[in-house]
Image (spheres, helix red, strand yellow):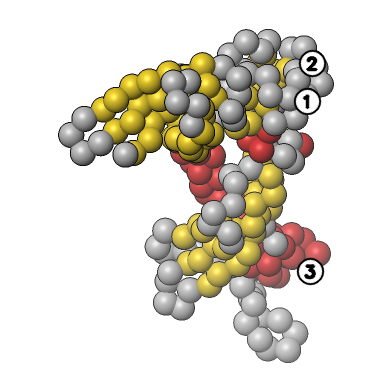
Amino acid sequence: MNYINSRGHFRPPWEMRLPPGKLLLLCLLFALPVRAELAAQLQREAESRLQAHAEQQAWPPYRAEFEPWLPAGAAQLPACEQAPRFSPAQPDARPWGRIPYLIQCPDSPGWQIRARVMVRVRLPVWVAAEPLSREQELVSARLELQAMDIGRLHRGFVSGPRPGAQRLLRDLPAGEPLYPALLAPAWLVRRGEPVVIEAVGESFTISTRGLALDNGAERELVRVRNSDSGQEIRARVVGANRVRTLL
């Protein structure tokens, strides 16, 4: 078969048989495996990052969807002889939502492109099963787990083990999820309640009774009044209805 065109130039047989439109389609088809493999690797990287975060935070079982995106120019990239490197553009960013990535080929010469993954996660989070009041302790609150799209919870969420020794800083309507800024440590000392005051010296401890004049969580300083002397002092909360001061 003659592979010489009318101008005397050599042309390979597949160019002689294909019209220009089909030739372009064939070139794109040859490039698709490279782009598809990069997309698959990018998704695996996002899956691994999300799983590591879930294990660290003791998440219950969750459902996740991943939608990798690469620019059109990725179809023209040469195959990478070495393993490509995938790194989030913001390493400390949360592993869900729209996550920008940088993909680098360490070959010489190599290349790099920007890509992204859209990660959607449905996770059981703690919500109020009834209206909750400010200063209410979660030990006595009715809570339940409800699966939600955490990408829509812009104030954050609470998942994993049931929250315990904490209190609410503001009211929370029924059906609303808990979020970190809403919670504070539970009071161990309450204003108007009796406390044990431990006065600690260099080699001794004296205990006496007192009355709390402030609410206080663990390690906080509160005002207390000595029941015997009537003296008001500041002491540190060390346990339930117990405070300590240094002599």
- Tell me what residue is drawn at x 74 percent, y 65 percent: 24
- Tell me what residue is drawn at x 77 percent, y 24 percent: 172
C-alpha span from label 1 to label 2 = 8 Å
For the residues labelled 3 and 2, say whether their Cβ atoms are less than 8 Å apart: no
- Nearer the observer, 129 or 15: 129
- First in sequence: mark 3 vs mark 2: 3
Residue type at numbered disc 1 = Asp
Indicate whether 161 appears above or below 31.
above
Q: Quadrant of residue 167?
A: top right
Residue type at numbered disc 3 = Pro
What is the crowding at mark 1: few (fewer than 14 residues within 10 Å), some, or many (at least 20)? few
What is the crowding at mark 2: few (fewer than 14 residues within 10 Å), some, or many (at least 20)? few
Expressed as whole percent of the image width and height from the top left, the position of residue 125 reads 65, 24
Expressed as whole percent of the image width and height from the top left, the position of residue 168 reads 67, 26
Q: Which numbered disc covers residue 131?
A: 2
C-alpha span from label 3 to label 1 = 68 Å
Which residue is label 3 attached to? 20
For the residues labelled 1 and 2, say whether their Cβ atoms are less than 8 Å apart: yes
- First in sequence: mark 3 vs mark 1: 3
Which residue is label 1 attached to? 171
Residue 103 seen anywhere in this rendered image of the structure? yes
Nearer mark to the viewer, of 3 and 2 = 2
C-alpha span from label 3 to label 2 = 68 Å
Q: Secondary structure at mark 1?
A: loop
What is the crowding at mark 3: few (fewer than 14 residues within 10 Å), some, or many (at least 20)? few
Q: Secondary structure at mark 2?
A: loop
Image quadrant holding the C terminus, namely top left
Expressed as whole percent of the image width and height from the top left, the position of residue 122 reads 67, 28
Q: Quadrant of residue 50?
A: top right
Indicate whether 112 appears above or below 56.
below
- Determine whether, in the image, residue 32 is placed left or right of residue 79: right
